[in-house]
Image (spheres, coloured by chain):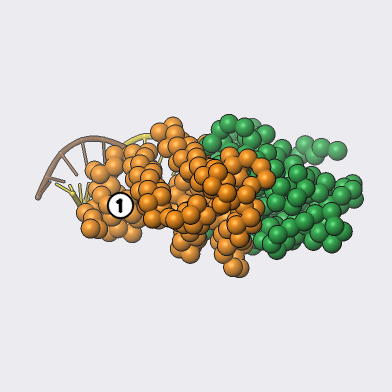
Chain colours: A orange, B green, C brown, D yellow
DNA sequence: GTCTATAACGAGATAGAC
DNA sequence: GTCTATCTCGTTATAGAC
């Protein structure tokens, strides 16, 4: 199943480098030495750094849709689905990196417009999906919420992205565990 | 009151540049042209980029302590104090930039250790102060919380930093308004 | 305290051989 | 597809004149 061709290796490694060091602190040279090729070979697959970034976000967005589909198919309750969504980020925290999209969002002003749009799309999609689950859960009497679902969804996405970013600097137990407990408590669903 | 000497001008401008573009996408050249000096003049005041970053965070931390003191002295209720704290970040959102510390936290792995330590200190101080206000409010029967105050504090700080970072990319109404409503609702203090 | 000049290096990118 | 070689530019940093 795993694709081991150079293009995929480059995407995998570049994503990790951006999640670790940010878009502007990662370079073709860095990527080349890590993968074991020359920078000119990277340019063959991704003509510019902007192209590489765009390809990364396209793949990342497709993977998000897949993951959400999976959760929607397998999840029983809306609470369980939301927990599964949070655990997506919780795994990223364990890897000691931030979300690709969160990393790019911090460098937003320095990004080519195609990348900016992709980042916006990813974030809006997350918020929309979360709000949907909350609404369904409230409609079915499974969840209770004092406030609007869009408020809660925006806050959850912000705290997940922020939690990942702060986690490395703060140290200690995983920040996203706190985030999950706080979020579920607010839904009377701890 | 305002200090207009070159060093202060450099600090002010560098901080804004980092808040806008991130630590690694801001350069001495960029800073020099913005302030109207040569890069060698910056080196006179701050010998290395790491020195400049450290001076920035030192000042930022001192300003935080001042701001927290101010809130503690002027605030009547703990709810009012927490709102004042949130509004600190809300103003930053209006400026269209992120927190200096949030920006640096994203680039954490690429920072000199002195800067890493300063970032950690800032974040822990914020969490500690927030938890303190929550505890006081709960003790006085002013606030109610289902969950621990440290959980709620870590989540608030994460959602504030995350909210600032996502705000530019997401567009629309201020994210931190949603964060504030969600946070206060969780404290039964909307 | 600010300048000019310059060093030493890394960045993204291209041409052309293999 | 990957390589060597090269280009141009931006980066941090230093030496020394004013």
Query: Can you identify the residue that label 1 sits on?
Result: A10
Image check: B126 left or right of A8?
A: right
The quarter in which the C terminus of chain A is drawn is: bottom right
The percent position of residue A86, horizontal first and vertical second, equals 50, 55
Image check: A58 left or right of B17?
A: left
Q: Quadrant of residue A46?
A: top left
Q: Name the chain under label 1.
A: A
Q: Residue at x 30, y 52 (%)?
A: A10
Of all residues, the one furthest to the front in this rendering is: A141
The percent position of residue A101, horizontal first and vertical second, equals 46, 46
Q: Nearer the viewer, residue A31 or C5?
A: A31
Secondary structure state at the residue bearing disc 1? helix
Is A163 drawn above or below residue A152 in the view shown?
below
Q: Residue at x 61, y 68 (%)?
A: A172
Q: Residue at x 65, y 53 (%)?
A: A186
Residue A105 in sight in this render: no
The quarter in which the N terminus of chain A is drawn is: bottom left
Q: Nearer the viewer, residue A174 or A96?
A: A174
Image check: A19 left or right of B132?
A: left
The percent position of residue A62, horizontal first and vertical second, equals 35, 44
Crowd band around label 1 with a 10 angstrom C-alpha radius: few (<14), some (14–19), many (20+): many
Is C1 drawn above or below residue A6 in the view shown?
above
The percent position of residue A127, horizontal first and vertical second, equals 52, 42
């Amino acid at each position: 199943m795993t694709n081991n061709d150079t293009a995929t290796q480059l995407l995998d490694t570049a994503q990790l480098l951006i999640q670790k060091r940010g878009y502007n602190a990662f370079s073709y040279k860095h990527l080349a030495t890590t993968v074991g090729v020359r920078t000119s070979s990277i340019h063959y697959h991704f003509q510019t750094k902007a192209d590489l970034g765009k390809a990364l976000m396209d793949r990342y967005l497709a993977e998000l849709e897949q993951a959400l589909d999976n959760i929607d198919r397998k999840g029983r309750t809306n609470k369980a689905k939301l927990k599964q969504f949070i655990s997506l980020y919780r795994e990223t925290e364990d890897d000691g990196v931030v979300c690709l999209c969160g990393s790019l969002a911090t460098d937003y002003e320095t990004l080519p417009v195609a990348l900016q749009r992709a980042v916006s799309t990813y974030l809006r999609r997350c918020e929309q999906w979360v709000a949907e689950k909350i609404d369904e859960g409230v409609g079915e009497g499974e969840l209770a919420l004092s406030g609007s679902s869009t408020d809660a969804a925006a806050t959850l996405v912000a705290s997940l992205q922020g939690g990942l970013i702060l986690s490395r600097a703060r140290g200690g137990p995983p920040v996203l565990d706190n985030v999950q407990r706080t979020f579920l408590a607010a839904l009377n669903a701890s």
